[in-house]
Structures are given as structure tokens and as C-alpha cells.
Amino acid sequence: MNRIIYQSESGGVAVIIPTESVELALKDVPEGVPYEIVDEADIPSDRYFRNAWVMGDCCVEHDLDKCKEIGHDLRRAARAEEFKPFDEVIAKQIPGADASAAEEARQQIRDKYALIQDVIEGASTPDEIKTALEANK
């Protein structure tokens, strides 16, 4: 099945899935915007890094730098979630709570996410980034 792809104004790739014919669907491509008609197989089935898609010569490709940005954002968000219970102990100085144990736990979290950060920075494919992030779950 064919798809129509074009670079969107927001920087991503728009994908049009024709319901009847490709010719009828072409009316949905903004005027003056270059587009490609590609096979469905030329579009990644994994949408994990959808916001890092760019138009290649014949298909949709991943912008590795954008994938890394997305990976770092996901890493930071996951780290923040793990920090929450310990941040509360430290920030509120809760009586009876062991602030040093909370800080030790926070350091372990920092160390874990520093390793993930290194993998993301050294990644040469989106799959390596995704694997590093999912290994954390």
C-alpha cells in the first residue's frame, strides 16, 4: 500500500494514508511542498522516535541527533520520577527519615542514569538508544 510523505512545517514527516487513491489524497499535501509517494514498508513501523523522522531519498529516516535529544528527554524524565521520593525526604527534612540514606539512593540513581547518558551519546542507531532506555524499565 502506498503512502504520501512530506516534510511538515514543524520539522517532522507527515504521512498521508490514502483511503481511496493516491491521486485523491494528493489534495491533502500543502501547495508547493515537495512530497514522495512511497511504499508502506519505507516508513518505520516503530514510532518510538517519530519526532525524529526526516525525509530521505526514498523513504523516512531517523535524524540521529534528534533521536538523542528525545532519548535524553526521556532519560531525564525517568530519573526525575525515581528521585521524587528521596527529594521529598531531603527537601522537607522529615523527622525520623534518614536523609543520608536518601542521598545515597539519589547517588545510585545518578550513577545509573549517567551510564544511560553515555550509551545515548555513543549510540550510532536509534535502536541502541531505545535499548538503553528500555533496559531501565
Image (cartoon, grey):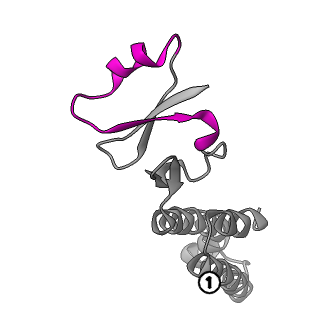
The quadrant holding residue 82 is bottom right
Instruction: Let me know if residue 67 is in the magenta part.
Output: no
The residue lying at 66 percent from left, 73 percent from top is: 86
Most distant residue in the left direction: 32
As rendered, which of 42 and 104 lies closer to the eye? 42
Residue 41 located within the stretch drawn in magenta: yes
Between 115 and 21, the one lying in front of the other is 21
Q: Where is residue 107 drawn, in percent x and y?
A: 67, 86
Residue 120 % position (x, y): 60, 75
Classify 10 Å Cα crowding around label 1: few (below 14), some (14-19), many (20 and above). Answer: few
Q: Is residue 90 above or below residue 33?
A: below
For the point 60% across and 68% down, the residue is 75
Q: Is residue 9 above or below residue 89?
A: above
Magenta range: 19-42
Residue that badge 1 annotates: 118
Q: Amino acid at mark 1?
A: Asp
Seen in the picture, residue 109 relative to 132 is either above or below; the reply is below
The residue drawn where x is 52% and y is 24% is 17
Q: Position of residue 112 (x, y in %)?
A: 71, 81
Q: Quadrant of residue 91?
A: bottom right
Q: Position of residue 60 (x, y in %)?
A: 51, 48
> How many numbered discs, if any?
1
The residue sitting at 52% across, 54% down in the picture is: 61
Side of 9 relative to 127 (left or right): left
Residue 1 occupies quadrant: top right
